[in-house]
Image (tube, rainbow, N blue to C red):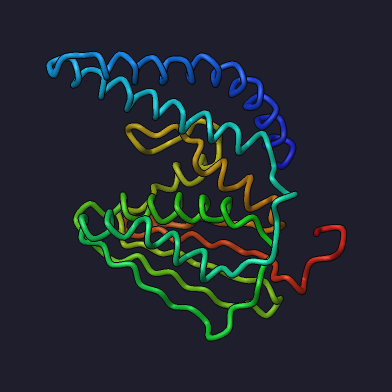
């Protein structure tokens, strides 16, 4: 799996590089044309900007796959990371009648991480959980320490669940259960967690609810070569 991710990353680097330059030009000229357009044309330019931004997000996912940011690692607090992520998703959760519940251990050990990349991981996971509950429900985030010393982050929703055949395909390039998904979100998630010397697992009974378990080493478990 690690070799597959490495190959995908190399391919993504080439694709992202080729797309980024013309994309930047298109986004720039679209803004210029919109500023000179009539009110009637503005609607179409808004759609063009939205679609270009969507392409840009996909390119950013490619870049994350292609370019590890190990040099930006530092000591981090997972609770603070979740505070930031929840503040970003709070409005979406309220609008869909989703309650984000927190169940953290009293003293959470520090981890050695790239905080921005872990924010992206948990944004992806919690956003998926919220979108799986269009009629509301709970997302429960549990942080605890395993006997092994690893930090265990469990994110559980009460959504529609994932069918067994789909569970097997999750993490494969471009596989998605979403109508407008790219299938890149969980590959990026897997890549980032791997770079943090961690692992993650997704489980669902296929009827109701999905649980994502993320395991990360705490700071004391890492060797000098890891850092």
Rendered image quadrant of residue 68: top right
- Left or right: 134 as drawn, with respect to 61: left
Picture coordinates of residue 167 (x, y %)? 47, 46
In the drawing, does residue 173 fall left or right of residue 38? right
Residue plotted at (77% across, 74% down): 220
Residue in the picture at 28% in, 54% down: 92
The front one of 71 and 150 is 71
Q: Residue furthest right?
A: 225
Query: 10 or 46, which lies in front?
Result: 46
On-image quarter of the N terminus: top right
Query: Could you tell me residue 205's position as x and y percent?
Result: 40, 58
Extreme residue in the left direction: 40
- Report which quarter residue 89 is drawn in: bottom left
Q: Residue sitting at 71 percent across and 30 percent down? A: 7
Q: Nearer the viewer, residue 195 or 25?
A: 25
- Above-or-below relation of 138 to 162: below
User: Where 125 sits versus 24, above or below?
Assistant: below
Question: Of residues 92 and 157, which is closer to you in this image?
Answer: 92
Residue 173 percent coordinates (x, y): 55, 32
> In the rendered picture of this protein, how many numbered marks are placed on residues?
0
x and y, in percent, of residue 156 in the image:
41, 64
Q: Is residue 203 above or below residue 150?
A: above
The image quadrant of residue 95 is: bottom left
């Amino acid at each position: 799996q690690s070799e597959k991710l490495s190959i995908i990353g190399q391919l993504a680097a080439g694709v992202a590089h080729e797309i980024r330059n013309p994309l930047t030009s298109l986004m720039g000229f679209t803004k210029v044309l919109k500023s000179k357009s009539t009110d009637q044309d503005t609607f179409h330019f808004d759609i063009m900007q939205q679609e270009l931004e969507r392409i840009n997000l996909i390119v950013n996912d490619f870049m994350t796959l292609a370019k590890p940011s190990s040099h930006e690692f530092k000591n981090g607090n997972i609770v603070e990371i979740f505070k930031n992520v929840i503040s970003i998703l709070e409005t979406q959760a309220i609008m869909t009648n989703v309650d984000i519940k927190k169940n953290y251990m009293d003293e959470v050990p520090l981890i050695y991480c790239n905080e921005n990349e872990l924010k992206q991981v948990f944004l992806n996971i919690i956003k998926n959980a919220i979108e799986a509950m269009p009629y509301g429900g709970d997302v429960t985030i549990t942080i605890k320490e395993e006997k092994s010393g690893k930090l265990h982050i469990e994110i559980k929703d009460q959504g529609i669940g994932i069918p067994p055949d789909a569970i097997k395909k999750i993490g494969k390039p471009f596989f998605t259960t979403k109508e407008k998904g790219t299938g890149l979100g969980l590959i990026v998630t897997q890549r980032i967690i791997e770079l943090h010397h961690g692992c993650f697992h997704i489980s669902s009974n296929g009827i109701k609810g999905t649980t994502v378990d993320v395991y990360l080493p705490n700071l004391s478990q890492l060797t000098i070569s890891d850092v």
